[in-house]
Amino acid sequence: MEQQLIDSFGRQISYLRLAVTDRCNLRCQYCMPAHGIDIVDRKELLTFKEMYRITRVLSELGVNKVRLTGGEPFVRKGFIDFLEMLDFNDLLDEINITTNGALISNHIHKIEQLKVKAINLSIDSLDKQKFAEITRRDVFDEVYKTLETLEKSAINLKLNIVVQSGINTNEIIDFVTLTKHKNIAVRFIEEMPFNGVGQKAVKEVWNYNRIIKEINDNFKNVEKLIDKKSSTSRNFKIANYVGTFGIIPAFTRTICGDCNRIRITATGLFKNCLFDDGVFNIRDFIRNGASNDDLKALFLSLVAKKPKDGFVAEKQRNSDVSESMSTIGG
Ligand code: SAM
Ligand code: SF4
């Protein structure tokens, strides 16, 4: 049998999250400071060819699903060509994308023809003014247009909402109500300190338990759905509503048990866990002449050291969690 990526807890890795850039056209408060992050020199970013090669090698080791993220994937020149290139990898079943949706409306038709099964669209408020405050950019109309176009397309649409205490918690009910007639999966994400600054003080902690309480207090017919293995969210629906909703316990980390994911940042740092601080620089390894067999051996040895959960990964770091999600790839 072909070699597979299996960690010391028996978890099989089949899902790569690849950040295609650290650049972004928005400045979301929970992700980066108003002046942005210190972006790296262009030549420090993985090239699309390098990304293709890394993905191919990983797919030969059992990775069959890739999520392209960033930064904002659509700000990188040539991203659509890269999608088309990746589509040729016959070992990949799904190529998914996480995007802020401000630059994609012209590309949706083309993307529909590819192996792009799902798009996660980040939209933290349904109020134009509040959206502008959160993202520090005035692009709500364009993002909402993307939402409506994607909802009608063949691509599955998930909405990502980072629940921010005192900012958008009063919209949780509005987002659930959106699933009444729209065929979408709304997902509430616990806010994490990946914002370029670090942990901030909040009046009230909006974790998984608080979010589900808010929903249970406001809807009578909340039904629990059966979660797919390795799902990042706990999923529900309101009886008779078309869409579903879920909660991603990103910070309380109760989903690590059957994690099937690894990450590669835009500069080629390999991450076994969102909470580790990058365990190997793949870019330099490749640029120093590594063969595909060298890469395979490397990936097998890295995955063997995948920590049990996000708490163990965080303990092993050299510095506190404060880097921007934009550099990690959310
Ligand atoms: N720019 C794209 C976007 O916003 O969808 C892709 C990259 S973004 C870093 C990926 C996801 O991470 C987004 O859904 C975003 O809301 C989420 N995210 C960013 N910072 C976060 C934080 N501090 N806590 C929780 N989620 C965060
Ligand atoms: Fe950009 Fe996405 Fe971060 Fe917002 S969450 S600043 S859109 S990378």
Image: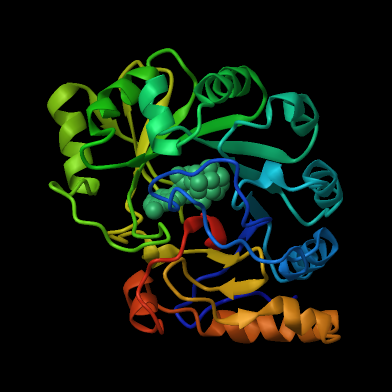
Q: Is residue 233 left or right of residue 159?
A: left
Determine whether 192 is above or below 304 in the image.
above
Q: Percent position (x, y) of residue 90?
A: 83, 53
Q: How many marks?
A: 0
Residue at 53% across, 19% down = 141
The residue positioned 75% from the left and 25% from the top of the image is 106
For this rendering, which residue is in front, 175 or 60? Answer: 175
131 to the left or right of 150: left
For image coordinates 59% across by 51% down, the residue present is 71
Location of residue 152 (image quadrant): top right
x and y percentages locating residue 10 in the rendered image:
49, 76
x, y percent for residue 41: 71, 66
Q: Is residue 309 left or right of residue 292?
A: left
Furthest residue toward front:
35
Image vertical order of residue 104 relative to residue 85, above or below: above
Residue 57 higher or lower than 246, as above or below: below
**Rendered-image quadrant of the N terminus:** bottom right
